[in-house]
Amino acid sequence: MTKWIRSTDYHTAGEPFRILSDDAPVPQGTTVGERRISAIADGAGADTLRAMLCSEPRGHADMYGGFIVPPNPVAPGEEASHFGVLFWHKDGFSTACGHGTIALGVWATDTGLVESDPDGLTEVRIDVPSGPVSAFIERRGGRLVRATFQNVPSHVIARGIPVQTSRGEVPVDMSFSGAIYASVRAAALGLEVTPENYTELIKLGREIKWALNDSPEAQHAEDPRLSGVYGTILFDDLGRGPLGPRQRNVTVFADGEVDRSPCGSGTGARVALLADEGVMAQEDALEHRSIVDTAFGARWTPGPARADGSRTFVPRVSGTAYQTGEHRFMLDPEDELGVGFTLR
């Protein structure tokens, strides 16, 4: 990696997203899901490059990004996606990323990769490992108004699973929204979702994730590649507002990483739980706030019934994303730190 590697960086509600397009590795595979498996095995050097871009001194323990890859093939007459993406973080390659999808939709229309309506709505179709998703970019006078991420059909997995933590036993709900999430009320752990509790929230998020990661509930029935608990959502209930429920959350994903945004796919996981229990009607909008008090709005439409007859919900999560910079990285062969290091 003596050549320069170029990236374009965005943030979505405070959470970083580093995009590589022209310099992105393209691991072998026919679909994005297959390319993800190849990337995990360092196909085309993808895992090495991921480590370099996430690790210090070029990144940090909470860095996030994506490699742009070709979209999935489609049958004649079907509409193809504009591109595919391999999402990555310090611990590997994820199956879904809502904040990243929002950033990619804005990036694609900012750069002209997808022609944008300067006074209307533009759909950016993206293939991700968990399935096809879309970002709907709304502009007025060319300026960004909002970006809305439409996720894959989402569903409840289980409720009230008892999990033993260092603060006692708590009931945990699990749901799927492109990835599997565990949800727990922060008050059940004697905490609130505030920056002052950041370290303790990370600790407990990791405890809950690893307690459930190999459980039967964390095994995805249709696609084993989607199995495992991706993140723990610790939330505060802020009561009901004029448009619907209001909550604040921190999502501790991968192995102790913290989403600064309200978490896009995690918001979808919360929507599935709230809609299923009747707390969030179809006409409602969830106000979902983050640990740094940025906000997403979310709604849902009915999805197709699952094989067991249970309901699914298609979340639509709205926010904004803005470019933060462009970068050129390289790895000097004489650099004794190699691809770098992380301290967490």
Image (cartoon, rainbow, N blue to C red):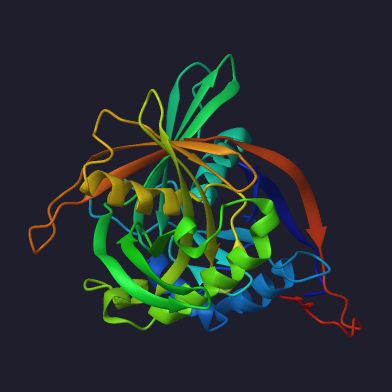
**Horizontal side, residue 103 vs residue 265: left or right:** right
Seen in the picture, residue 46 relative to 5 is either above or below; the reply is: below
Quadrant assignment, res 163: bottom left
Seen in the picture, residue 80 relative to 257 is either above or below; the reply is: above
Name the spot of residue 240 as percent of width and height, x first: 38, 32
Q: Quadrant of the C terminus?
A: bottom right
Q: Quadrant of the N terminus?
A: bottom right
Name the spot of residue 149 as percent of width and height, x first: 43, 41
Name the spot of residue 24 as percent of width and height, x first: 62, 63
Residue drawn at (70%, 49%) of the image: 8
Q: Tell which of 139 and 1 is nearer to you.
A: 139
Residue drawn at (92%, 83%) of the image: 334
Q: Tell which of 296 and 276 is nearer to you.
A: 276
Seen in the picture, residue 233 relative to 281 is either above or below; the reply is: below
Name the spot of residue 258 as percent of width and height, x first: 61, 60
Instruction: Give the total of numbered labels.
Output: 0
Residue drawn at (77%, 44%) of the image: 325
**Horizontal side, residue 128 vs residue 256: left or right:** left
Q: Tell which of 264 and 203 is nearer to you.
A: 203
Name of the residue lying farthest toward the left: 309
Quadrant assignment, res 323: top right
Residue 265 appears anywhere in the view: yes
Residue 77 appears anywhere in the view: no
Residue drawn at (44%, 61%) of the image: 188
